Amino acid sequence: MAPPGPGAPQPAPAAKGGKGPLIALIAAAVLLVIALAVSFIPFPHSSDGGPTAAFRAQQELDKVVFKFGQTAGAKFSGTLKYTYTTSTNPTEDSIEFKNLVVSSANNSEGTIKLDTQEAQYRQIGNNVYANGPKEFWTKLIPNAPTSLDLDSVASKWADTDGTGLLWLGSFLSPRKLAGRLAIGDSAASTSLGQELPAPNNGLPDARFWPTSDPKVTMTGNTITVGSMTTTFDPESKEVTHIKGSSTTADGIKYTIDTDVAPMTDNDREKLFANERSFAPELLAVPAPGIGVRDPMMSAVSNAGSCTSALCQFAWDLQGKLRSDTYRTGYINYGMNVSFTANGNAVASPCSKVVRVDFGSTTRANCDAVNLGNLPNGTSIRANVSNSKYLPFNTKTSDNLSNIIDKNEAAAKQQITLVRTGTKRPGDATKYNYQITDMPSVYAVKQGDYEFDGFGPAGSFLITLSTGYDQHVNGGVFDPNWAGTKTLLEQAKQQVAAAGNIHIVWFTAEENTATAAKALLASAGITDQKVDVYYSKLES
């Protein structure tokens, strides 16, 4: 999309009775208009002065991607191979999905398969659940300790938190996937042309018209960008198939091959109705992938008296998790304690279930009773090796209802995608992609403002990459920096354009977040209108 140039000059009135000067003046005006228009065309030129084949392919891709990204959702049947390249020991996993309904707000439901193990799959917000046989969970958690109670998870709904199972709803959400099908703009080879006069002029997130040829080709009804090929219906411009390989901003290397079909209004209504009826089952669900710190059970010395009638034992059971990620939930310890004396079983086994909230410690007691006539000084031992554990994630009904309501509203929200200039290659483009899942050459237009993206919770997104904190002094932006005025003007324009829709600013620098909050407060803009979050730039 070319930036608007100055309006066509208006010729002065011609002298009465003479057409020659009028014709000459009109011809001159036309030539001037042509010159002005050409000078503002933001695309590479072919030898005949028109746009290149690559740019024409890009224009067609925009039509396809914009329609896809502006839908409420889609249905997918195919396969996806993926590798978390940033993990300690990266391995490739493969997942097959069939009739997977995915909303643009990340919600999804359908059937998935890991090798031969099939399971039902659902995603609500950032919560992913599966229901499959024990073999499915064994495949999903190949190094699970023997003490993890997977028998209690078999053929029941469980949270996949910590398992590494790909969040298909987030990955295949049309609003996010559209960005990955589009022109990537984070390559260092991108050539920058004229800086756009608004809205980020002079800021680290300023945009420029790219002058280098896009790496895109079109053959019939297929368009290839890099190694990603999108097939579409030439009449409706709807995506019908996606195939290729790429790597996401957060380091997921993937190969995808999937059929795509539109999600109907009935599909969308059914998806969210199913989630609401399903929600009561999710208030406390097993989460076998959550790692618990060792030692999980610690024997307490001198737990109590030991006589021929009774010998007391105790253990401290802890709920500290390996990850510092905030969670609400608990661990159920299924204690199965047996007792021996001189290598022989004595007393009755002690069996009990003990609940330990995440982050806390609970003491559990088990007594050996009915020991019989044992000689004085006999040593009684307790064996807990057959004990099991199983973490549970908890949610409140209000929390789940709020997530579902916001996601449904976000999926139904009509957005308008537009092409704009690219941010500078490097941190600016990477951070934009990290937060919005869209290349910075795409924006979401609302009213008279172009936002960086639109989130699954129904908020317009703004990204502030690196380079702002050098203008922060004492927790506020330097009033002498021109960017301070620009940011303030932007905020006011954003609020006016967004109407009753929430806005979220994401900053790559912690000091920038502090200064941004102060700036908004100085203009009387509360977090009811604009929230600010610090989310560091991923390497």
Image (spheres, helix red, strand yellow):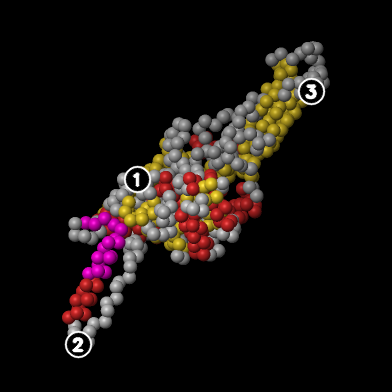
Residue 304: which numbered mark, if any? 3
Position of residue 70 in the picture relative to residue 364 (left or right): left
> Which of 166/472 is in front?
472
Residue shown at the point (71%, 33%) measured from the top left: 362
Q: Is residue 28 visible?
A: yes
User: Within the image, what quadrant is residue 501 found in?
Assistant: bottom right
Which is more N-terminal, label 1 or label 3?
1
- Amino acid on which disc 1 is placed: Ala
- Amino acid on which disc 3 is placed: Gly
Q: Residues within 10 Å of mark 2 (few under 14, many from 20)?
A: few
Residue shown at the point (66%, 28%) measured from the top left: 297
Q: Is residue 324 above or below residue 226?
A: above
Q: Position of residue 20 (x, y in %)?
A: 17, 81
Residue 164: which numbered mark, if any? none
Q: Is residue 301 above or below residue 74?
A: above
Position of residue 336 in the picture relative to residue 98 (left or right): right
> What span is in magenta?
31-46
Please tell me whether residue 14 belongs to the stretch shown in magenta. no
Q: Secondary structure at mark 2?
A: loop
Which is more N-terminal, label 2 or label 1?
2
Q: Residue furthest bottom?
A: 17
> Which of 439/180 is in front?
439
**What residue would you read off at disc 1?**
187
**What residue would you read off at disc 2?**
17
Position of residue 106 in the picture relative to residue 253 (left or right): right
> Which of 334/104 is in front?
104
Please tell me whether residue 32 belongs to the stretch shown in magenta. yes
Q: Is residue 223 visible?
A: no
Do tag 1 and tag 2 residues touch (Cβ < 8 Å)? no
Q: Position of residue 442 (x, y in %)?
A: 40, 56
Distance from disc 1 to disc 2, alpha carbons, whole Å, reads 61 Å
Do tag 3 and tag 1 residues touch (Cβ < 8 Å)? no
